[in-house]
Each structure stands twice: as structure tokens, then as C-alpha cells.
Image (cartoon, rainbow, N blue to C red):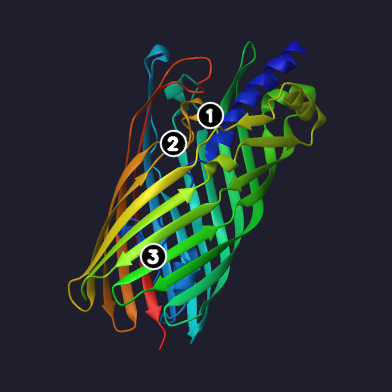
Amino acid sequence: MSKLKTILVSVALMFAISTSAFANGLSLNSIGARALGMGGAFVGLANDATALYWNPAGLAGQQSSILVFASDIMPSATYKMDLMGIDAKTNSNHYISPNAFFNYNMGKLAIGVGVYVPAGLGAEWNPMDFGYPDGLKFSSKIGVINFSPGVAYQVTDKFSVGVALNVYYAMFDMYQPAAVDGVGVFQFEESSTGLGYGATIGLKYQFNDMFALGATFRTKTTVTMNGTAKNPAFAAYNAPESEFDRDVAWPTWISGGLSFKPNDKLTIALDGQYSMWSENEALVAVYTDPVWNSAMTAGGDDTFELKWEDALQVRVGLEYMVTKGVILRGGYYYDPAPAPDETVNVLFPSSTNNVLTGGLSYRMGQLCFTGAAEYLMGAERDIELNATNEMPGLHQMDIFAFSLGVTYFLK
């Protein structure tokens, strides 16, 4: 059984890497081209169809509309470890997500529905940069689609409440070389999907024409991932693959925002958004194949400790009306990494980001065209070589993303 144990230990390391996917590299920081241009400072403003995501209470009192947009995310990461002679860079990939929102105003009552991508990213490396043979794959890709109906009610002329249901469908694929001492290097792969349910509750208070406050609470959503793990090295033991289950939690999100309109042309927004990443204390995989399950559970290799910390994003955004049909936007936000040095790895880089954003809109009758872009400047992480850190070395990641959308306002 010593050969089998060696193979299983190698695969356990692969699962440790795959389960660290769900950090700030997963969440898309800005939903909607308008919000993206303002640095995602949108909880207190929440006055377009994406209020369904940012603050459902903002749906009340809006003009009815249909909004469609697409976002493209282009991460660029590097990893260096001089001791092993590694100097690697990710391939240039595009991660594109389509999104659609609809809201309808019925006086004090408003309804909305959204189909959008709140999370998604990935990384693809050249395995030869890490000393693996050519022809293998070394990549990850994860995405979440949310189907979200919602309703808002204008309690008074100044105060509104709203709630949205979140139905998450998650997808995850991972490929990695699995080196087994004395046997060879094999293509390990894992693919899974899952479904989870949660809710978003929002409040908005419009003090006057100048000031508005908003608050949002999004519940923890646990997604049960079901999939298949494969490794040809297991073929000798009649177990080349196994189905598995793993619960993953998208954390509780609490946010508050202020919007200030000092004159008819300028709007200033400020948000604080708190993600409770510590709710994902550990990820546990349960395998249906008895060989996989017994070996993994016996050594505790079915469980991966994340050790994440809760994180607060601070966001500020500006919007300026140049003419009646042209609006310019700009923003900044600070995005701290919740993952400690112990769990950082190259398939899902996690860095603290300083982010600059900008955008513009052009309205023509019932149509409004909006574009925005953001650049996430990731701080270098020089992770020490010791017994606790999973992947020591110098990690760095920048991300460029942009979004293009069109809104049709109903009469």
C-alpha cells in the first residue's frame, strides 16, 4: 500500500490547492458598468437596475428599465521562487461574463429581476515553468451565476426597503500536474458544479435632494458542490476517478453607503463593505469511491483549513454631468486580501489591491450607453519558506477589467 499512499498524498495536495479558490480573487468587485466606474461605491446611491445587487431598496422610485452589460476580466500574475529556479507568468486570458437586469416601477411598489455573474476568475500557467513536462494543463476557472428576483417598497417619501432572493449556480474546473515519486507525473483534474440559496436585504433613506444613506445585508450562501476528481495514477487500483461533494460558503456581506449631491451636476458616494470570510473555516470533501474516501479521511486530507480573516473594502466614487446626455465617473477602492500566507497559491492568487476606476455614459432618448474600466494594482506578497506556508516565493497579480452596457428606459 506504500505506493498507493504516495499517490493519495500527492492528490491530497492537489485538493488543498483547489479548495483555496474562494478568496478575494473570486468575487467580482463591481456589478454594472455605472457602479464599476464609481469604484463600486453604490450602496447609498443604488439608483439603477443593479440596485438589486447593491441595495434592493433602491429599486423603489426608479424609472422602469432594461439593462444589459458584459464584463471582461484580464488577470496577470507572476510567481518567482529562486530556490527552485521558478520564474513564471500566467497566460493572457479573458474571462467574459454577460449580465441582464430588469426593474419595473408600480408606484410605491417596484419589482426587479437579474441574471448576472457576481463571481468568476481563473488562472492558466505554463507547466514547464514549474518543471513539469509539456502537454499537461495547469489552470483553474471558477464562475457563479445568480438568478435574483426582488421587490422594493417605498414606505414613505424618504424611506424604502427591499429584498432579493439569490439563487447561486457555481462552476469550478481545475487542472494540475500531479507528481508521484518513483511513478511519474499525471494530469490531475477536478470539475464540479453546485447550487445554493440566500437573500439580500436593503434599506435606503433619502434625507433630501442632497443626502441619502443606504445599508445592505447579504446572507451567507452555502453552495453544495458536486463533481468528479480524476487521476490516471489511480488506475492501477481500479479507482482512476471519484465523485465528491464539498460545501463552500459565499460569506455574509454587510455594507453601508452615503451619497452626497452638492449641486445638480456632481454626485459623491462613499461605501464601506464588510465580507465575513472567516465563515469558511474549513472545506471538507466527501468522496464516493471507498479507496479515495478511506485514504483521505484517515490522514485528514479531506479537510483544508483556510484561516481567512474578515475584510473591509473602502470605496469612493464621483459622478459628474458634463452635459444633459454625457456623464463622467471616477473612483477608488481598497481591497484587502483575506487569505494568509499559509494558504496562498498560484492557481488562485490573493493580493491586497489598490484600485482605480473610471467611466462615462451617453444618453440618447430612451437609450443610455455606459462604459467603465478598473485597474487593480496588486501588492507583492513575499511568502517565507517554512513548514506552514503552502507556496513560498514572490507572488504578484494585477487585473484589468472593463464593462460595456446599454439601458433602455421604459415609458
Between disc 2 and disc 1, the foreground one is 2
Closest to the camera, between mark 2 and mark 3, is 3
Q: Secondary structure at mark 3?
A: loop
| Residue denoted by label 3 | 44
Q: Earlier in the sequence, mark 3 or mark 1?
A: 3
Q: Position of residue 300 (x, y in %)?
A: 71, 24
Instruction: Indicate whether 323 appears above or below 191.
Output: below
State whether residue 330 appears in this view.
Answer: yes
Q: Which mark is residue 136?
A: 1
Tell me if mark 3 has few (under 14), some (14-19) or many (20+) residues whose alpha carbon lies within 10 angstroms of its own: many
Q: Viewer-proximal residue, 308 or 187? A: 308
At x 50% / y 84%, what residue is drawn? 108
State whether residue 49 appears in this view: no
| Residue 14 spot, x, y in % from top left | 60, 28
For marks 2 and 3, give the CA distance: 28 Å
State the image coordinates of residue 363 (x, y, percent, origin top left): 28, 77
Which residue is denoted by mark 2 in the rendering? Answer: 350
State the quadrant of the N terminus. top right
Query: What is the secondary structure assignment of the residue under circle 1?
Result: loop
| Left or right: 274 in relation to 14 | left
- Amino acid tagged 1: Leu
Q: Secondary structure at mark 2?
A: loop
Question: What kind of residue is marked 2?
Answer: Ser
